[in-house]
Amino acid sequence: MTPLQIKQITLAMNGDEAIAYAVKQCDVDVVAAYPITPQTIIVEKFSEYVANGEAQTQYVCTESEHSAITACLAAGAAGARTFTASASAGLALMHEMLFVTSGARVPVVMAVANRALSAPLNIHGDHSDSMAERDSGWIQIYAENAQEAYDTIIQAFKIAEDIDISLPILIGVDGFTISHTLERVDTLPDDAVKEFVGERCFPMVLTHEGKTVPFRLDPANPLTMGPNALQNYYYEFKRQQTEGLNVAYKKIQEVNSEYAKLSGRCYGNGLIDTYQLDDAQIAIVVIGSTAGTLKAIVDKLRGQGIRAGILRIRTFRPFPVEDIKNALRNVKAVAVMDKCMSPGGFGAPVFTELRNALYDVSPRPIIVNYIFGLGGRDSSPPELCRIYDDLARIAKLGHAEKTVTYFGLRE
């Protein structure tokens, strides 16, 4: 099929509703979840689909987020296609089981409506919650808007369930900014989504009985999943997870390209998405919805003859090192915007990852960090424009007077 052969339906949905709609179309077997703002609309809306008979899914309303991810882990291990959603403290409560899920190689798909962590209590959007789980072995992809949230959920099942990957995947959307904002979303027909995602396949493994069977819990073919592995095997298991993420690096790009042929929509190469970066001398690197605002600023600056650009990191895990190197090879000064912080560290997570990736590049751009938007604090276009002013000055001077800036903070 080509995009011209598929008639898409335009709907008005917020990001949470767009995610729920995509999950409904993906023929999911089990959804287990617990409500938490600003994620609640996702599972609330999906429960309506189940109640109305629009989704033939076993919906499990658990007593906590820890139980929700455990239920998805168990169902996925038994062969089901599973989905859950969470945010903030809910994601933090899942912490232990996130590692178990990735270690057991169960391809759960989870949407996270990114939200600040307590204390003090704050229900608004920043990336503190998912960045705290960056080493849990999950693939992490972040959307810029509701349309991308819808499209990425559909892609997520195809990526996670690839037999050479078999890892869980987290799709992040900025709390309230995307989760609760009404937008235009073009949706594919149900049958087109079902065909694109396909049925879940399983790696074949050798059991203790000498049988070659699908890697899932089945009483007819007993096997152990997530066994006790001490000094002589644990290391190898963890290394295999890294190999799965290496495969995901290529698969994400392939699925992004394949989905573009189906829908007419693509997001860079699936790993990064650039804007006006080819000849840029100064650039901002960012994750999430802030990229949309920055595009309007870059257009204005370009009209003034300023060669500004944007690099949006769509896939944070696996971290696209080579793509970032190539994208920023001609840029003189780079500002990395982090919507979270790393207390006691030198800069925030995206900054430290990117600075590390560019360490051996020659010539290397000057890299500075702007920590912003914690607890959902707004950054207006005129304020964001000042970052480009700073970058222009840094590029001219050839050095930065300050590496880490707490942007928009009252001090």
Image (cartoon, rainbow, N blue to C red):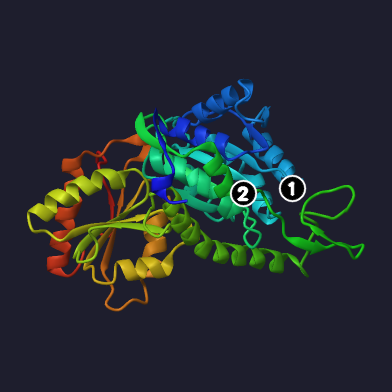
Q: Earlier in the sequence, mark 2 or mark 1?
A: 1
Residue appearing at x 42%, y 59% in the figure? 271
38, 215: nearer the viewer = 215
Q: Which residue is mark 2?
A: 198
Q: Secondary structure at mark 2?
A: loop
Looking at this view, name the residue that lies furthest to the front: 5
The vertical placement of 368 against 7, above or below, is below
Residue appearing at x 90%, y 65% in the figure? 210
Looking at this view, name the residue that lies furthest to the bottom: 362
Counting from the top left corner in percent of width and height, residue 163 is at 66, 59
Q: Which residue is mark 1?
A: 77
What label sits on residue 236 in the rendered view?
none
Visible in this render: residue 386?
A: no
Q: Secondary structure at mark 1?
A: helix
Which quadrant would residue 325 be assigned to in this image? bottom left
Counting from the top left corner in percent of width and height, residue 58 is at 69, 31
The disc labelled 1 sits on which kind of residue?
Ala
Looking at the rendered image, the disc whose residue lies closer to the viewer, 2 or 1, is 2
The vertical placement of 371 against 37, above or below, is below
Visible in this render: residue 64?
A: yes
- Left or right: 157 with respect to 263? right
399, 270: nearer the viewer = 270
- Left or right: 168 with respect to 20? right
Residue appearing at x 45%, y 29% in the figure? 121
- Left or right: 16 with respect to 346? right
The disc labelled 2 sits on which kind of residue?
Gly
Q: CA distance from mark 2 to mark 1?
A: 18 Å
Q: Residues within 10 Å of mark 1 (few under 14, many from 20)?
A: many
Residue appearing at x 24%, y 47% in the figure? 294
Check the picture and name the quadrant holding the C terminus: top left
